[in-house]
Amino acid sequence: MGRFCYKCGTPETEGGPLIGGMCQRCFASENPLLRAPEEITVEVCGRCGAYRVERRWWYPENPTTALLEVAKRITISKLRVAQYALTRVRYVKVEEAELVDVKIEPKFTPAGPIVEVLARGKIHESQIRSQIARAEIKVCENRVLCDTCSRISSGYYGAILQVRGEERLPSDGISKIKDRLMSYFFEKCKRDHREFVSKVEFVRGGLDFYLSSVKLARQGAAVLKSELGAKIKETAKLVGWDRRGRRRFRVSILARIPKNRLCGRKSLTQQK
Ligand SMILES: [Zn+2]
Ligand SMILES: [Zn+2]
């Protein structure tokens, strides 16, 4: 006696080959090819436009296409595809679904950004026809502050670079130093998004830069040393203990510009 589908009773000779006791039609309707979320949430920094990708912050070169790129990556991480393994259907990641072709297309629509997913393929090798599944995932944006921007907005700084002269610095000299260092720091911060300038203060006869790290303060001091012959002195003051009981220091770096280096008509970068 032949076998029958346990769901609908169709004989295997008509609706087979049977998969897990079911005819071809029942197997396909019992097992959707795709599991997709209705919506995904993209976290974007409302201040600088960085996107959170997995656990890290990504600072895109092209902000217009960045949302779609991030939406696609999040979709790939959330999608699950049906694949028969050993004795049952399992839902696996896109890259593990060998019998299924998945197309993922993020796009802007008048109703907002979406991700379209089209999957075509077989869950089980014995299926005669491929299954098809479509999904349309809504993309929601959640505005937050990235790690760097939340540090800046809390007024955090890791070191101070103090610029002074052997004699009181002339005010046009101070402006030149400020411009030179700010453009230097701007380039550094563009390459490493953990670094930032928290604030700059004009003080009597000089300037104070409040910076994200000791490293950045040392680099700024090195510029003043090589371009103006500044003498560098570093001091660390104990300011407390961290949660693990280690001592925390606030580092100040003093860059003292020698006499007469900022006089005359030569610009800062021409002086060597
Ligand atoms: Zn059936
Ligand atoms: Zn930010």
Image (cartoon, rainbow, N blue to C red):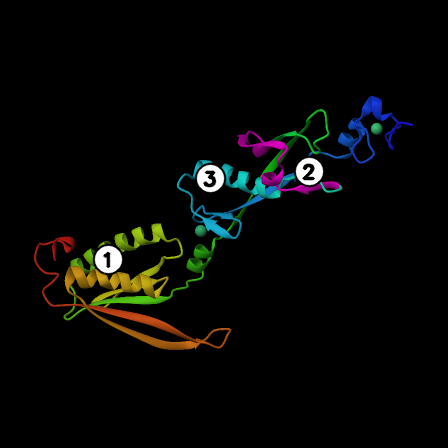
Q: In the rendered image, which quarter contains the C terminus?
A: bottom left
In this rendered view, identify the residue nearer to me: 180 or 36: 36
In this rendered view, identify the residue nearer to me: 221 or 165: 221
CB contact under 8 Å: marks 2 and 3:
no
The residue tagged 1 is: 178
In the image, what residue occupies the spot 12% across and 61% down? 262
Q: Residues within 10 Å of mark 2 (few under 14, many from 20)?
A: many
- Tell me: is circle 2 under 8 Å from ligand 1: no
Q: Residues within 10 Å of mark 1 (few under 14, many from 20)?
A: many
The residue tagged 2 is: 83
Q: Is any atom of residue 83 visible in this view? A: yes
Mark 2 or mark 1: name the one nearer the start of the chain.
2
From the top left corner, tell me how far across and down residue 240 is, in percent: 44, 77
Query: Which label was assigned to residue 98?
Result: none
The reply, left or right, for residue 243 in relation to residue 262 is right
Compute the Cα span from label 2 to label 3. Answer: 32 Å
Q: Is residue 250 above or below residue 119?
A: below
Residue farthest top in this picture: 14
Q: In the rendered image, which quarter contains the N terminus?
A: top right
Q: Considering the numbered disc 2 on the image, is that residue within a helix, a strand or a loop?
A: strand
Q: Is residue 175 above or below residue 51?
A: below
Mark 2 or mark 3: which is in front? 2
Q: Is residue 56 above or below residue 36?
A: below
Q: Which residues are magenta?
A: 88-117
In the image, what residue occupies the spot 38% across and 64% down? 157
The reply, left or right, for residue 264 in relation to residue 257 is left
Compute the Cα span from label 1 to label 3. Answer: 33 Å
Mark 2 or mark 1: which is in front? 2
The residue tagged 3 is: 66
From the top left corner, tell me how far across and down residue 217 is, in percent: 30, 64
